[in-house]
Amino acid sequence: MRGRRYGGGLAVAARPRKPWGRLPRSGRPDRTRSSSHPRSRQEAAVCAAPASTRGFAVTCYDPDAPTGSGLWHWLLLDLPADCAGLAADAGHGDGPQLPVGAFHLRNDFGQAAYTGACPPPADPDHRYLFAVHALDTDDLALAPDTPAGHAGFVLTAHTIARGVLRPTFRRG
């Protein structure tokens, strides 16, 4: 089986620029609370999106969650093509901190917001894939109650470039 090929990579950076090797404890709440952003007082920025970009989406996915299908921590959709970055509180749910038209889908914790890392205590390191998807559309036509797995399918079909930050986290 072959994976989806994108036209090119998308440069994604964090401001202030810090290594993304491990998620810091200060930016990782327990799974019962949403967090402003995966890094405390840090913003995400997009650089060099393809000229054909019509919109963006931001997701966080843990492929190592012991569910058999991974775990979606964040799905932020319908970001406009002129969006060059996100405020540090973009993961707090829908509101004025988001660009006009952008909204969150419910993650696998049932929250329409970012939910931080919370792997089982005995698990080894989990990878957290923070992805910025450059899209060929400005409207994915997904309702706020769309299941995360279906949204991932639709995102893949409309992604023309993707940049990923891959920090890890383990309790202990």
Image (cartoon, rainbow, N blue to C red):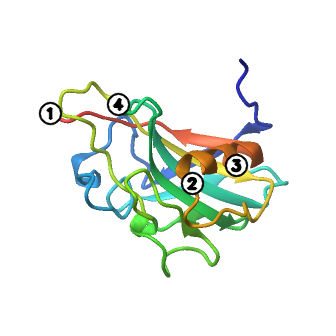
Q: Amino acid at mark 3?
A: Val
Q: Residue at x 70, y 25 (%)?
A: 3
Mark 1–mark 3 distance (CA, rounded to whole Å): 36 Å
Select label 1 or label 3 by which is in front. 3
24 up-or-down from 169: above or below: below
In the picture, which quadrant includes the N terminus? top right
**Dot placed on the residue nearer the N-terminal end, 4 or 2:** 2
Is residue 108 something that shows in the picture?
yes
Q: Residue at x 79, y 59 (%)?
A: 137
Q: Residue at x 76, y 36 (%)?
A: 6
Mark 4: give few (<14), some (14-19) or many (20+) Cα within 10 Å: few
> Are the residues at dot 1 and dot 3 in contact (C-beta closer than 8 Å)?
no
Q: Amino acid at mark 2?
A: Val
Mark seen at residue 58: 2
Q: Amino acid at mark 1?
A: Gly
**Dot placed on the residue nearer the N-terminal end, 2 or 3:** 2
**Dot placed on the residue nearer the N-terminal end, 1 or 3:** 3
44 up-or-down from 6: above or below: below
Mark 4–mark 1 distance (CA, rounded to whole Å): 17 Å
Q: Nearer the viewer, residue 35 or 145?
A: 145
When asked about the image quadrant of residue 140, the answer is bottom right
Secondary structure at badge 1 equals loop
Q: Which residue is mark 3?
A: 154
> Are the residues at dot 4 and dot 3 in contact (C-beta closer than 8 Å)?
no
Q: Which residue is mark 1?
A: 172
Q: Give how far across and how far down residue 138 sits, in percent.
A: 76, 64
Q: Which residue is mark 4?
A: 66
**Dot placed on the residue nearer the N-terminal end, 4 or 1:** 4
> Are the residues at dot 4 and dot 1 in contact (C-beta closer than 8 Å)?
no
Mark 2: give few (<14), some (14-19) or many (20+) Cα within 10 Å: many
